[in-house]
Amino acid sequence: MEQGLAQDDDPEDDAPDGDASAGDASGVETDGAGRAKAAWLWPLEPPWPVITLLGVLIAVFAVETLFGVGAFVDQYGFRPSDLAQGHVATLFTGLLVHGGWPHLLVNALFILVCGGPVARAFGSSLGGAAAFYGFIVVCGVLASLGFAALNPAATDPVVGVSGAASGLLAAACGLLGRDAGLRRVTRIAVLIFALAWVGLNLAVGWGGGFRFLGAAASPFAGQVHLSGFIAGLALLAPALWLTRRRSITA
């Protein structure tokens, strides 16, 4: 690994240790012979960090249904006023709480489809899984902070992992192909998809169309999604670089 880096300064061309057969730095899944697997197989063969994350989200929502979804949303959801009062815990607890089964299932679908290539890019080791979870949490927190910056006086609680899932969606787009660094973000295909995602959220989110996802889906949900998407695009390259540097020095 160190020899490879000496020949090529781009750490994104090296797969993380312990996951050499799972895929390459582009996030493209390969089989044992190095042949690329069809993209439609990703959701059918999710890596264990994705399965574990989905299990945690389902378990938390099962607890919600026992004690009352509305009570959980009200107590653990994030509101911009929480920051002024010094209550930062809801930035994290709000990611685990959902407003209904439709809300949870839609987010789970996004994680299942987009989380696979991102998790494989980080690697299947414990360190890679920790980096994958850290990426999700940071995207989710930044999504909530973006919402708070745009709506400092909002009173509706923000719950759900949709902001982080949007970050995974952005990262999965950035992993298409083998371009490194910021070239991932500026490729035409990624920019077109980003514009489409922005347009969809502006049209549906601010029109109140996310209400079908449950009581917690406010008209401002689109702002959370867009903030998470921007965070995922911005953090992908540095997150992969840090993961690979850690695997080399460990």
Image (spheres, rainbow, N blue to C red):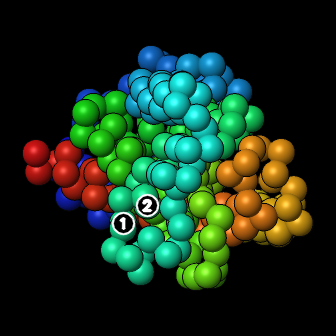
User: Residue 179: x, y in percent?
Assistant: 53, 59
**Of residues 126 and 223, the one drawn nearer to the viewer in this rendering:** 223
Instruction: Report the label total.
Output: 2
Element type at marker 1?
loop
Element type at marker 2?
helix
User: Residue 13: x, y in percent?
Assistant: 39, 51
Residue 1, above or below 83? above
Q: Is residue 132 left or right of residue 107?
A: left
Residue most extreme to the left: 250
User: Residue 119: x, y in percent?
Assistant: 45, 38
Tell me the quarter of the picture where residue 8 sits: bottom left
* Residue at image location 56% in from the left, 19% down from the top: 45
CB within 8 Å, label 2 to label 1 = yes
Residue 196, above or below 27? below
- Name the amino acid type tagged 1: Val
How many other residues sit within 10 Å of disc 2, few (<14), some (14-19) or many (≥20)? many
Which residue has dot 2 on it?
Answer: 91
Tell me the quarter of the picture where residue 152 sits: bottom right
- Name the amino acid type tagged 2: Leu
Image quadrant containing the N terminus: top left
Q: Is residue 127 left or right of residue 227?
A: left
Which residue has dot 1 on it?
Answer: 88
Q: Is residue 217 visible?
A: yes
